[in-house]
Amino acid sequence: MSNATDRLRIAVQKSGRLAEPSLALLRRAGLVFRSSRDHLFLYGENMPVDVLLVRDDDIPGLLVEGSCELGIVGRNVLTEQRLAAADSGGAAELLSLGFGGCRLAIAVPQGSAIGEPADLAGLRIATSYPALLADWLRENGVSADIVVLNGSVEIAPRLGKADAICDLVSTGATLAANRLRELVTVFESEAVLAAAPGILTPAKAALAGQLAARIAGALSGDGVRLLMLQAPRAMLPAIERMLPSRETPSVLSLDGRPDDVALQALCTVALDWQHLEALKRLGARGLMVLHVERMLA
Ligand code: ATP
Ligand code: MG
């Protein structure tokens, strides 16, 4: 099935950890949606972009077969399916999105004698990510048996089905609750914007590019603050040295006050009270730190 209309389709997880943050990001990129009656589809009201709500595992396949042009999915799912298909023409990763962070890690029962990856040789490891695990085992020269399970991987050791597991971890609370100890990280993941490998029509390619740029613009404001202040011109070099600044600040002259300047600088969130107090000691006045909503380079 290919998507023949001129509307762009973006696949997003229907419910689960990525569902809400994915839609929130699309809204921050300026999209306004109306929900369909079956709640499987969101119709874009202000741009020809629609959202398909699906299981996250289906997203790479929808991109490869051309049913959707873009998708928001964990890098773990995207890479697992690309490795499993063993072809280089899979969906491409366009942008890291800064949410859904987790790691695929091997864990062993707390009382186990396994102390390093080499100790896994000849043992059984349960996972829902056999291709990523096989890749890691091969690269690290460990020969172990992979037991594929599609859920409840963390109880496999207690059931006697495996000696270790390889599963997604964020805080580690689930591992602790199941009396498992993390041994080694196999793969680092977060949500990514992924694109169909096929050739898009020029109109769709332009739309996909515009949306990706808007998403990048919404993300680039994360962790960025705009600092505004006024200061004696003579103190400018000292003030500029103190800024956790991303680029050269803008310096403006003030009418009728030739010895003073106004300064605007994009800074990282590392700009804290200590910075402001130190700037004030250098003679800065009217200090203001503003949240940056979005940026377009
Ligand atoms: P679906 O019904 O869509 O298949 P799911 O159960 O496979 O849902 P979720 O548990 O919602 O998926 O996880 C979706 C993604 O969230 C994971 O693939 C991963 O990229 C990310 N993630 C972040 N933290 C964790 C975590 N602690 N455990 C599992 N996934 C996590
Ligand atoms: Mg899933």
Image: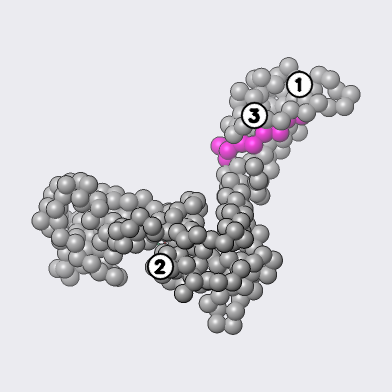
> Do residues under tags 2 and 1 come within 8 Å of each other at their CB atoms?
no
* Label 3, label 1: how far apart the Cα atoms are: 18 Å
Helix, strand or loop status at disc 2: helix
- The answer to if 215 sits in the magenta stretch is no
Where residue 180 sits in the image (x, y, percent)? 24, 58
**Prevailing SS of the magenta stretch:** strand
Which image quadrant for residue 232?
A: top right
Q: Position of residue 258 (x, y in %)?
A: 84, 20
Viewer-nearest of discs 3 and 2:
2
Indicate which disc residue 61 carries: 2
Residue 267 is covered by the magenta coloring? yes
252 lies left or right of 3: right
Q: Residue furthest right?
A: 256
Q: Is mark 1 within 8 Å of ligand 1?
A: no
Residue 85 location (% of width, % of height): 31, 62
158 relative position to 55: left or right: left
* Position in image of residue 280 (x %, y %): 69, 27
Identify the mark nearer the N-term, 2 or 1.
2
Q: Which residue is mark 3?
A: 248
Which contiguous range is marked in magenta? Answer: 262-270
Secondary structure, mark 3, is loop
* Residue under the point 37% across and 61% down: 77
* Residue type beneath disc 3: Thr
Depth check, mark 3 against mark 1: the one in front is 3
The residue tagged 1 is 232
Q: Would you say residue 106 is visible in this rendering?
A: no
Calculate the distance from the C-alpha at mark 2 to the C-alpha at mark 1: 60 Å
Q: Is residue 120 toward the left or the right of residue 90 in the image?
A: left
Disc 1 crowd rating (10 Å Cα; few below 14, some 14-19, many 20+) is some
**Residue 158 or residue 54, whichever sits in front:** 54
Nearer to us of marks 2 and 1 is: 2
**Quadrant location of the C terminus in the rendered image:** top right
